[in-house]
Image: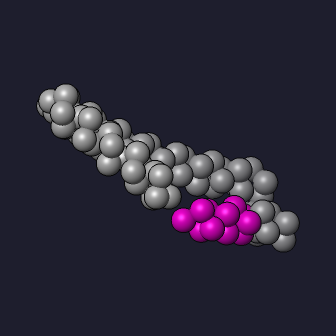
Amino acid sequence: EDGGAAHVISSIVEAIATGELTPSDGARIAGTVGQYLRAQEVGELEARIANLEGQQSRVAGMGDEQLIATARRIIARQDEGGEG
């Protein structure tokens, strides 16, 4: 999607350069693109936060032995070069 946004901005700049858009129209369109991208980022962050909150509630329900076992599995995966 980043390539898509970069392409849109590049197209806006090109349209301004060729006279198809006025600079003020180009700025307004670019602003709209920026707002759209921020809205997407907010949605992605909301999803990530919900995921983290779900993980937190799972951890809160674990006993000490289960927490220790989980921590050992995570450390073992990191030692093997996998993700945590």
- Picture residue at 59% right of the left edge, 68% below the top: 4
- Picture residue at 15% right of the left edge, 30% below the top: 63
**With 48 as the anchor, is 11 left or right in this view?**
right
Look at the image and tell me whether residue 68 can be seen. yes
* Position of 15 relative to 50 (above/below): below
Q: Nearer the viewer, residue 19 or 36?
A: 36
Q: Position of residue 46 (x, y in %)?
A: 36, 41
**Figure quadrant of the N terminus:** bottom right
* Quadrant position of residue 33: bottom right
- 62 falls in the magenta region: no
Q: Nearer the viewer, residue 14 or 75?
A: 75
Q: Position of residue 76 (x, y in %)?
A: 39, 51
* Position of 60 relative to 41 (above/below): above
Q: Nearer the viewer, residue 13 or 24?
A: 13
Q: Position of residue 84 (x, y in %)?
A: 41, 49
Residue lying at the far right of the rendered structure: 17
Range of the magenta residues? 1-12
